[in-house]
Image: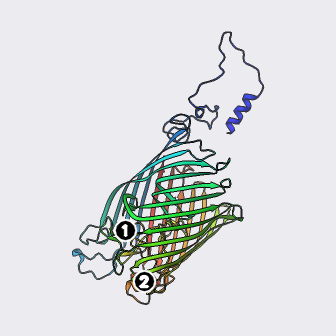
Amino acid sequence: MIGLALWLCAALAPGQEEPKTVGEPLQDAVPVRDRWRIPFPDYPLNQPGNGIDPYHQNTLKGDYPILGQNIFAALTARSDTTIETRRVPTPSGVSAAGAGRLDFFGEGEQLFFVQDFAGTVEVFKGETAFRPRDWEVRVTGILNYTYLEVEEHGIVNPNVDDKKDRPDRKFSLQEALAEYHLLDLSDNYDFVSVRAGIQPFVSDFRGLLFSDTNLGARLFGTLANNRVQWNLVAFDQLEKDTNSDLNTHHRREQQVYIANLYVQDFLWPGYTAQVSFHYSRDDGDLEYDDNDVLVRPALIGAVREHDVDALFFGWAGDGHIGRLNLTHAVYAARGKDEFNQIAGGETDIAAHLAALEVSYDIDWLRLRGSFLWASGDKDVDDDLATGFDSIFEAPNFAGGTFSFWNRQAVKLQGVNLVNRNSHLPDLRSSKTQGQMNFVNPGLFLYNAGADLEILPELRAVVNASLLRFQYTEPLESFTQQRGIHKDLGFDVGVGLIGRPLLNNNVQFTLGTSAFFPGTGFGDLFEDRDTLYSVFAQLSLTY
């Protein structure tokens, strides 16, 4: 824009007219294919682009139309690589190779590697600088390779005579959607649009309740000069692949309906408030995962198929009040579990979750404090299920990926005490393929941390959490073990996030976290040794 302004000033400034040769035709206009190809003046920042340069004008990146004056295409290629070494509680894999072993828990060291190659094609119509696209079609395919190596038999497969590693390959059509702009509601382009197909959606600011890419339809738009945003969403969930967590082409028999409303500058400038409603209808059909493990119904108590209907009413907020940054969420869950396997019968759901993060910026330093409460169930023998569980969470909260408790799945007698990429101790067989379980111990999480902008290209993250069960009665009933303490453990983590080119084309993340088991964790696993995770991630995007 600066270069264009200078060029216009120079062009409009008075000056001496150059003499013209007699008989030379006047050049009043230079024909171009469309207005997008009008050349910029000769200026150091205005370098001409080409077919493979993503930083300048490029037809493949949506800068020039591919058809007519306003139909564009954008191609994106991405490579995501993750390598991780960790120590987690692992059952002793008793087999013919070690029939004399008596320890219930064995060697917990594991090596985990994931490689994703993704390609996205977008075709859209519209001048999108000041208004929504008229329509869009987007397709994303992902080729995944996953490798897991463990020290015990019976981990990668229930067959204890099987090997101790598991390579796996998967291709998924992870996105396939079409979006259409229905109408404008004002001169400032408040609008109503519809999107259908396999699409991503996060229902709140931090992904505490629903964050997934799945098959559905979404009606959405804005009001009051974009100050108000709203969504009406219906998903017919696809089954997930066990080892990659990518979508398959099989229906899961679970429907999810979501409605939410955002209001920007609510009460305070810079603060956005949200109210939401979620409904999950899970029919609970029989399902074995790709590793031959029963995930629906879970291997808890009486193994019986059952439906789970859950409604969630929520209020959340995100933004700043003056210099104080604030994120919060409160959810109430209601509904019915046709047959809860821990309670041994039908239960009415009455559970709650509250989360709060407050931070303060001091130049290059952000200090954070967080708290999360997921209600637990004190009486497993009544018909009231008060332990909170979510639909499909992916929380960016209390350290996120730099927290051992959030990053790792901790298995306990056929289910997970906590699932990967979750905070909730919900005794669920799998976050991706299992059913919600509202008879669980609940959690108190107290967190402190800091974000340090070391360089424009480099950020450091420091994180520490204290964790306690709210009630241990569900654990005692499930494990048939009395006297389990509430002290869960202490979690610390540090990490680095880098963008060497000051953009998102090259990103890396390095992280390590350690979990120091408390008395309650030791009661469950008979192990007080420190657990850990060390990982590296590299993302390359064109």
Estimate the x, y position of residue 280 in percent, counting from the top left. Answer: 47, 68
Q: Distance between the residues labelled 1 and 2?
A: 26 Å
State the residue lying farthest toward the top: 22
Looking at the image, which residue is at 41% across and 90% down?
482
Callout 1 crowding tier (Cα within 10 Å): few <14, some 14–19, many ≥20: some
Estimate the x, y position of residue 254 in percent, counting from the top left. Answer: 42, 65
Give the residue number, with chain letter if any, for mark 2: 475
Estimate the x, y position of residue 429 in percent, counting from the top left. Answer: 38, 72
Give the residue number, with chain letter if any, for mark 1: 110
The label shown at residue 510 is none
Closer to the camera, 184 or 421?
A: 184
Question: Is disc 1 placed on a helix, strand or loop?
Answer: strand
Q: Which amino acid does label 1 sit on?
A: Gln
Looking at the image, which residue is at 32% across and 64% down?
290
- Picture quadrant where residue 534 is located: bottom left
Q: Is residue 51 above or below residue 262?
A: above
Question: Is disc 2 placed on a helix, strand or loop?
Answer: helix
Closer to the camera, 224 or 412?
A: 224
Q: Judge from the rendering whether residue 26 lies leftward or rightward of residue 518; answer left or right.
A: right
State the residue lying farthest toward the right: 14
Location of the N terminus by quadrant is top right
Looking at the image, which residue is at 51% across and 69% down?
493
- Does residue 240 appear anywhere in the picture? no
Q: What residue type is labelled 2?
A: Leu
Closer to the camera, 257 or 109?
A: 257
